[in-house]
Image: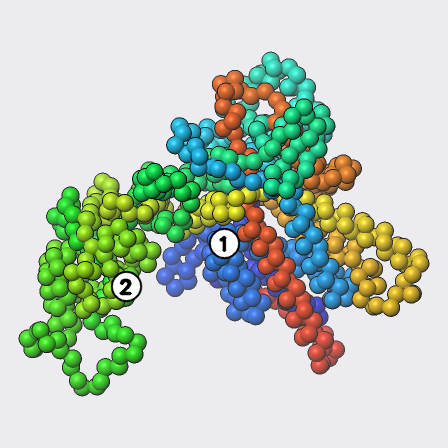
Amino acid sequence: MVMACRVINKRRHMGLQQLSSFAGTGRTFLGPVKSSKFIIDEECHESVLISSTIRLLESLDLTSAVGQLLNEAVQAQNNTYKTGTSTLLFLVGAWSSAAEECLHLGVPISVIVSVMSEGLNSCIKEVVSLQVPIYNVFDHLDSTKTFSGLETFNISLCPFLQIPSDTGLQKEHDLNDVASPSLTTYSLSGIPVKSPKLFRRQTEVEADKNTLQNPQTLKNSLLASSHYRKSILIHSRHFNRTANNQWINKPDGFLEQHGAATPNTYRCNDLVELEMGLSHGDHNSMKLVDEAVRLQYQNASIQQGNCTMPFRFDISRIFTCCLPGVPETFSCVCPGFITVVSISNTTLIKELENQPVRVILIEGDLTENYRHLGFNKATNINTLLESMKIQQNSSEEVWTNYVLQVLIKFNVNLVLVQGNVSEHLIERCIHSKQLVIGSVNSTVMQAFAEASGAVQVTYITQVNENCVGNGIYVAFWRSIPSDVIDRINVITIVIKTEGINLVTVVLTSPVTAQMQTKEDRFWTCAYRLYHALREQKVFLGGGAVEFLCLSHLQILAGQSLSKRNHVCSGWLHNTSSWLASSLALYRPTVLNCLANGWHRYLSTLMYNTASCSSEFEASTFIQQHLQNARDSGSPSSYILNEYNKLNSGIFNPSISNKLEQIPSIYDIIIPKIEAWRRALDLVLLVLQTDSEIITGLGHTQLNSHETEGFLFL
């Protein structure tokens, strides 16, 4: 399927142009509001709705060398962190264009590589000032405060508008109302509300001040809104307003504010606040993650008893069971292992229900022809088991009879197999009241081995009494309407035992095409929380980190420009190193081009979230705050102070006693930084490879008709 087309100039760096083209296909995936794409299979004509970079690249033609490099970089990011791929893809395109611009301006390739690497490393050091440590978030997990309890709050404490992507409502740009400063977002309950922004125009700030001074005016303005709103988030207990705001990053990582009578130390010590901050608008998925964490915590508390070992979120013991065609209301989180089996097992499940069964765990395949890799069966020789009588049946029938004898001998009614299972064996086992389930995850097998005492074996011939586990219960999961069961032609069962450390998240959707997207969203939220808890710190989110990088690079470029002027006016001719003089001359240009990548990132983010009606408006808006940040003398302090401004104001009286439940917006640290590094490394690799090809033999002999072509995506 042809996704896009772009003219390629063969006299320029084709690799960089191809990177920009590939990256452009995923620009709508940046930010919390994602414009989904339909992918249609040309062979079977089935369609799937995608909103992630990984699914997009699976559908593009990436047979070119650049496409393969891009795919490998994105896959490496996804395999390691399961998040950050959209950021990586966008920055690849932005920085490819930046490198092209540098080449167009005559900057040597060695200087581009050196200064871009230097600039990104400097940004990574600078953004440390926006880290917020996580501290003992599980200490009060058993309190009445839950993720569900915050669903009526509007969470928008971030530089850019935050709209829940799971509401199914897409942004609408009203070109007739471009000048209107009011923005619409959606609360967790789906009600449109007006939202304050971190980076606001000065007129908005002044208007807010006047409104806040008159509570009656504020009340009237709330009621006059086109839709009733339940809350306005203008407060966070992490950043309090003072007359003179000065922020320092303490050695222990805590952000501390000076200028008040009593210095405050800022940190995140509440799980619900952390989850809400990391949900990035996808509150339905994060709610399921929260329930899974609480189930794990309860199970760990029961297992440890009086032990005081700290609880750790184990994402490897969480699994998803997807049920397309089932109503949304059936989505939930349950302990144990939930899976789907053929509807032909219905009678068998009814007989096994409410009674403990014995289990065998098979690591490999459970098929007649499954052999050890070193076993080569000789031709024209039949291998028979001595305990069996020679029959005229096929070898598979003989093997099936033997398996049934083993199961009956050890009184086994449940067999979990990590690999494939013979269809003929499954049918025979149903009649013999044995349930066989294949393609079971290795971690699930390990969990059942730990809880039931079973020992995993590779072949059925290795089974003995010591390998059999006990105390397993099999039951129907939930009462799904019969018409739904007939449509999906499967039944859902739950397998569990006392003390098993397994949690299954059941994901349902009446629209089959949305199932993959829903599962991807859940895992994205789960891994955000997992990485945040493992790192014990997060970034202030909503674009604050990227804005600091942009401002910092522009300051560095200004400083380098002053040095360059000094070089050109005095001692350039005395410089012995060509590279040193080139770095001094071109550093401001390269830093500005690198900063332009961040600028495009923020502009696209604001446009995608409907904060601005166009990227041009977003760019102008960002420029205003860049000037304010430069005037303040400290961009990081400016960002923190802008966050702090949202904390002043008057809340709706109905929630004024719940200020402690309002969270900030957070980003995870290591996956974000690694996405930056991978994006720049890929761009610089393609840049240098292109240069070696272009400067090779015959590069000056291109004919005029060879100067342009088309790249199809």
Q: Residue at x 57, y 29 (%)?
A: 236
Q: Nearer the viewer, residue 684 or 414?
A: 414
Left or right placement of residue 545 versus residue 110 in this view: left
Image x and y of residue 565, in percent? 88, 54
Is there any visible trace of residue 450 in the rendered image?
yes
Left or right placement of residue 464 versus residue 105 in this view: left
Q: Residue at x 62, y 46 (%)?
A: 604
Q: Nearer the viewer, residue 597 or 664?
A: 664
Query: Disc 2 designates what residue?
Result: 363
Camera-side mark, 2 or 1: 2
Left or right placement of residue 646 versus residue 534 in this view: right
Assess whether mark 1 and mark 2 are in contact (beta carbons under 8 angstroms): no
Q: Nearer the viewer, residue 352 or 203?
A: 352
Q: Residue at x 22, y 68 (%)?
A: 459
Query: Disc 1 designates what residue?
Result: 81
Name the quadrant of the C terminus: bottom right
Is there any visible trace of residue 90 in the rendered image?
no
Amino acid carrying label 1: it is Tyr
Q: Quadrant of residue 455?
A: bottom left
Under circle 2, the secondary element is loop
Q: Earlier in the sequence, mark 2 or mark 1?
A: 1
Left or right placement of residue 425 versus residue 657 in this view: left
Q: Residues within 10 Å of mark 2 (few under 14, many from 20)?
A: many
Q: Quadrant of residue 371?
A: bottom left
Amino acid carrying label 2: it is Glu
Q: Which mark is residue 499?
A: none
Residue 438, placed above or below residue 507: below
Residue 273, placed above or below residue 6: above
